[in-house]
Amino acid sequence: AQSVTQLGSHVSVSEGALVLLRCNYSSSVPPYLFWYVQYPNQGLQLLLKYTSAATLVKGINGFEAEFKKSETSFHLTKPSAHMSDAAEYFCAVTGGTSGTYKYIFGTGTRLKVLA
Amino acid sequence: DVKVTQSSRYLVKRTGEKVFLECVQDMDHENMFWYRQDPGLGLRLIYFSYDVKMKEKGDIPEGYSVSREKKERFSLILESASTNQTSMYLCASSSGTGGYGYTFGSGTRLTVV
């Protein structure tokens, strides 16, 4: 079965520091991979997605993620954290054995940005 | 922009009540989904639908049912609300399969007392 693991339920960074949020997936076939962001009391917003084109994917708000098949990873990065980046981030996978209608979500990583 | 609208942001219901959560999307998406979100558990799929009058169980369908009579509307029904159904409920829609991505509503925070 497909699965997604997000390492670290809480991550704290200083303003201006590198943001790195980790996501590893398991899939027997090439997947589609996504990062979503959720601000307090809101729904999820798509940050970026990998759909088998370029392995380095750029998203909104300066975020990017790199698909590494050999490591089954899709980590999210941003060179310089801003206070407004404080939110919860979810990695998701679809495709392969779970069918392509359903997405499997990770348990989320809450990002805190320190002034 | 695609919009997914959930009828209520906050809802308080009593144990045993029948509860309806409504979701409407305005971009003619084929697929619609209901998730519940709980701290530490992420998003868990309750039900989804890939066409009008079609529905499929997700990972945690017990205690829930759904209705999709029109393409744009997908309703989640709690037949007899219980306190363990207190949660954030998120509706999403998508076009086609695979790489399109979901569009989410703002969520309904349901409290069952």
Image: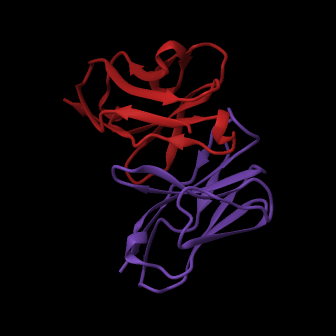
Chain colours: A red, B purple
Q: Is residue B85 left or right of residue B59?
A: left
- Spot occupied by residue A75 in the image (x, y as percentages of width and height): 43, 22
Q: In this view, does A92 lie to the left or right of A8?
A: right
Q: Is residue A73 left or right of residue A8?
A: right
Q: Is residue B68 above or below residue A91?
A: below
Q: Is residue B38 above or below residue A65?
A: below
Could you tell me if residue B50 is visible in this image? yes
Q: Residue at 55% across / 37% down in the picture?
A: A2
**Which quadrant of the figure contains the C terminus of chain A?**
top left
Q: In this view, does B84 lie to the left or right of B25?
A: left
Q: Residue furthest left?
A: A115
**Which quadrant of the figure contains the N terminus of chain A?**
top right
Q: Residue at 80% across / 61% down in the picture?
A: B52
Could you tell me if residue A63 is visible in this image? no
- Spot occupied by residue B76 in the image (x, y as percentages of width and height): 60, 69
Q: Residue at 64% across / 41% down in the picture?
A: A98
Q: Is residue A100 above or below residue A15?
A: below
Residue A79 picture quarter: top left
- Spot occupied by residue B45 in the image (x, y as percentages of width and height): 55, 54
- Spot occupied by residue A29 in the image (x, y as percentages of width and height): 64, 26
Residue A111 picture quarter: top left
Residue B54 picture quarter: bottom right
Front one among B76 and A101: A101
Q: Residue at 49% across / 50% down in the picture?
A: A43
